[in-house]
């Protein structure tokens, strides 16, 4: 996600800002680049509960299903007000929290606008088991595209993030453990970990799920012909734009004082 945000910001540089005021996107990108490893880690950090064992509500700030109007990141800032004043924080911490907030926004967009209407509340994709399969196939397909688009520097960038009491609700050790797990997955030729994770959820072996994903005929007939992949990708792209607004609003005291 960090790279997609950077790509959009680079494309917006020199144009009017998202809210119509003076151009600030180049300044925002420069600010993020100053602590790029911290932003990288922040953009994937909410899923740290995988290693910490904390309940998901403690890292994502919403129930399932999420309450109407809850955007998660404002709730985090209310619950932990020390994260709200970026001028009182080290820049690395502020940039990390900005990335964390963007992740929360994108998670809610996925839940409310992709998971629920396409895979839960609609029978267009068949019965429940088939919809569950299509949802995890989509997740794995998009994850593969994301990994393939990462620059070679991604692994070193993430590895260079060194949390120092950045979150009051997650220990540095858990963040470091999560960082190290993801760094291994970013190594050249590393297997796509989501294949094994989602295969388990689907009660399949990783080999069988991987073979299904690699079967062009199966993917064409049972996935691309049924799942509105392009529509999902378009919505995710606009969600990245929305996340830039969240990041800009959060870091604006630092941008305005630069």
Image (cartoon, rainbow, N blue to C red):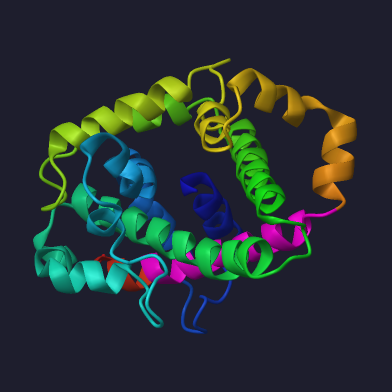
- Pick the front one: 34 or 4: 4
Residue at 60% across / 45% down in the picture?
Answer: 139
Q: Position of residue 172 (x, y in %)?
A: 14, 37
Q: Quadrant of residue 50?
A: top left
Q: Does residue 35 sit above or below 147 in this rendering?
A: below
State the quadrant of the C terminus. bottom left
The range drawn in magenta is 226-247
Q: Quadrant of residue 202?
A: top right
Q: Position of residue 96 (x, y in %)?
A: 28, 50
Q: Does residue 12 sit above or below 29 in this rendering?
A: below
- Pick the front one: 29 or 92: 92
Count of marks placed on residues: 0
Q: Residue 243 magenta-drawn?
A: yes
Q: Does residue 209 sit above or below 107 in this rendering?
A: above
Q: Position of residue 48 (x, y in %)?
A: 29, 41
Residue 252 visible to the viewer: no
- Pick the front one: 102 or 253: 102
């Amino acid at each position: 996600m960090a790279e997609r945000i950077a790509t959009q910001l680079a494309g917006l540089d020199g144009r009017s800002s998202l809210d119509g005021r003076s151009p600030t996107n180049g300044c925002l990108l420069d600010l993020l680049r100053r602590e790029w490893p911290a932003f990288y880690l922040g953009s994937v950090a909410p899923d740290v509960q995988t290693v910490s064992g904390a309940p998901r509500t403690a890292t994502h700030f919403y129930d399932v299903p999420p309450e109407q109007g809850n955007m998660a990141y404002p709730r985090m800032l209310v619950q932990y007000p020390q994260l709200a004043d970026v001028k009182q924080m080290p820049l690395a911490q502020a940039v990390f929290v900005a990335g964390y907030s963007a992740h929360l926004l994108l998670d809610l967009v996925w839940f409310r606008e992709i998971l629920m209407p396409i895979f839960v509340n609609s029978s267009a994709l068949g019965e429940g088991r088939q919809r569950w399969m299509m949802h995890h196939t989509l997740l794995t397909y998009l994850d593969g595209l994301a990994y393939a688009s990462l620059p070679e520097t991604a692994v070193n960038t993430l590895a260079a993030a060194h949390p120092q009491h950045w979150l009051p609700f997650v220990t540095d050790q858990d963040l470091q453990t999560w960082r190290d797990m993801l760094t291994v997955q970013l190594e050249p030729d590393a297997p796509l970990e989501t294949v094994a994770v989602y295969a388990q959820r689907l009660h399949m072996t990783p080999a069988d799920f991987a073979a299904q994903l690699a079967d062009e005929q199966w993917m064409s007939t049972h996935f691309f012909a049924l799942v509105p992949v392009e529509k999902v990708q378009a919505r995710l792209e606009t969600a990245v734009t929305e996340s830039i607004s969240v990041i800009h609003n959060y870091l604006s005291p630092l941008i305005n004082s630069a």
